[in-house]
Amino acid sequence: MKLYFLLGFVFLTMVVHCRKMERREFAKAIHQLHLNTHHDMILTNWLCIVEVMRNLNTKATHYKPRDQSTNGIFQIDSHYWWDDGKIPNTLNECKVKCSELLEDNLRKAINCAKKILVQEGHKAWHVFNHCKE
């Protein structure tokens, strides 16, 4: 019985910490920070990417093999783009910490997404082919 209580508490805690952003709120942030027309990516592409990958969840984290993870609404990879403080020799191209990609304020995540788009193009997001118009 104690185990079920503990599992219920853990699940409830996880639910409380997740934040699903509204589409309109995400679109406003994208527009304000000029990601909507950055490198021929339009708003509908970005909406599709973030909905398919993590359902507009700003706190999303996905652990991958080889000590890597992807974080935030854009699921940005830890090895190249940000520093988690644990894995040695990360490139940290975006000069951000893990926690900054999980914030509800998307400024740092969007700026990092811009940098990724410039360096790798839309292929950095494996779901993009699903999202093409």
Image (cartoon, rainbow, N blue to C red):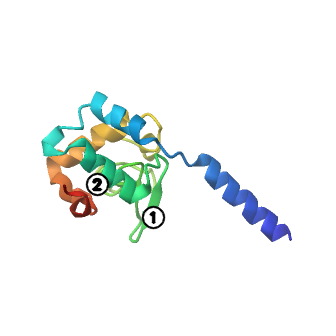
Quadrant position of residue 113: top left
Q: Quadrant of the N terminus?
A: bottom right
Which residue lies under the disc numbered 2? 80
Q: Position of residue 62 (x, y in %)?
A: 45, 61
Secondary structure type for disc 1: strand
Q: Position of residue 15 (x, y in %)?
A: 62, 53
Task: Describe residue 28's horizontal placement relative to residue 123 as left or right.
Answer: right
The dot on residue 63 is 1
Visible residue check, residue 5: yes
Q: Position of residue 74 (x, y in %)?
A: 35, 50
Quadrant position of residue 42: top left
Q: Residues within 10 Å of mark 1 (few under 14, many from 20)?
A: few
Visible residue check, residue 87: no
**Where 95 falls versus 65 (above or below)?**
above
Residue at x-position 36% and y-position 51%? 50
Q: Quadrant of the C terminus?
A: bottom left
